[in-house]
Amino acid sequence: RVFRIYPLYWVLLLAAFGLAYFHNPGLLALPRELLVSLFLLTERNNPVLSPAWSLVFEMYFYLCTAVILLLSRSRWLLLMAAWFGLSCGLIFSAKSLGLEGRLYTDPLLLEFGFGCLIFFAISRNYVLAPMLALVTLLLGAVFFFWGAQQTLHQGLLPPMPRVQSFGIGSALLLYALICLEHQARFTMPRLLIVLGTI
């Protein structure tokens, strides 16, 4: 993941700095600590390349997953569950512990947990019946459009409302589509498969 993510990110980051020279010279005077954080993808608030905020979460997830796999290849599932249990505890008690604003207490991490739950369900062949998959698909769309409606009226949602709307909605949509695909009721368009593979 390091070789797939960092080189392209660095090329784009340097290009963005190059453009900043002409359009926003203030970015060239960022503190050294912030520059190091931007290059290492440890800073979520990226003033140079704002879409890269998601890569910070991605690299954190891959790092923790790699550590878990190094600890035990046979009990990785149990360790993943323990890690997400700990993450949930930290997320929901961040305010009382004075840990708000930390990467490891950000509610958006719950979305990686949703992805792991979907993987677990499909790998154990917990595939929804076609009618139940369609209901799940509809429910996912309802959550997703609820988030879109909130965003339309309030602007960018804080992390927890985003997880409750878009996160849950996306997880339900994904799980339903995978279930339908497993039953040969639905096939992803070839173009989307090619893009996903890339």
Image (spheres, helix red, strand yellow):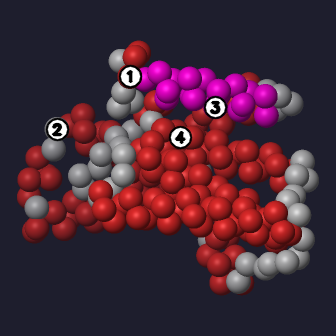
Can you tell which mark lies on residue 109?
Answer: 4
Disc tally is: 4
Q: CA distance from mark 4 to mark 3?
A: 9 Å
Residue at the location (20% across, 37% down)? 32
Q: Is residue 49 visible?
A: no
Q: Is residue 84 above or below residue 24?
A: above
Residue 45 in the image: state x and y as whole percent: 30, 46
Category of crowding for the residue at label 4, using alpha-carbon neighbours closer than 10 angstroms: few (below 14), some (14–19), many (at least 20): many
Q: Earlier in the sequence, mark 2 or mark 1?
A: 2
Q: Earlier in the sequence, mark 4 or mark 2?
A: 2
Q: Amino acid at mark 3?
A: Phe
Residue pointed to by mark 1: 95
Which region of the structure is painted magenta?
77-94
Residue 140 in the image: state x and y as whole percent: 63, 62
Q: Earlier in the sequence, mark 2 or mark 3?
A: 2
Q: Earlier in the sequence, mark 1 or mark 4?
A: 1
Dot 2 and dot 1 residues touching (CB under 8 Å): no
Q: Secondary structure at mark 1?
A: helix
Q: Is residue 198 above or below residue 62?
A: below
Q: Nearer the viewer, mark 1 or mark 3?
A: 1
Q: CA distance from mark 2 to mark 1?
A: 28 Å
Q: Is residue 60 left or right of residue 78?
A: left
Q: Amino acid at mark 4?
A: Leu
Which residue is more in the foreground, 47 or 138? 138
Q: Amino acid at mark 2?
A: Pro
Residue pointed to by mark 2: 31
Corner quadrant of residue 56: top left
Q: Secondary structure at mark 3?
A: helix
Q: Nearer the viewer, mark 1 or mark 4?
A: 1
Dot 4 and dot 3 residues touching (CB under 8 Å): no
Can you tell which mark lies on residue 84?
Answer: 3
Which residue is more in the foreground, 115 or 41? 115
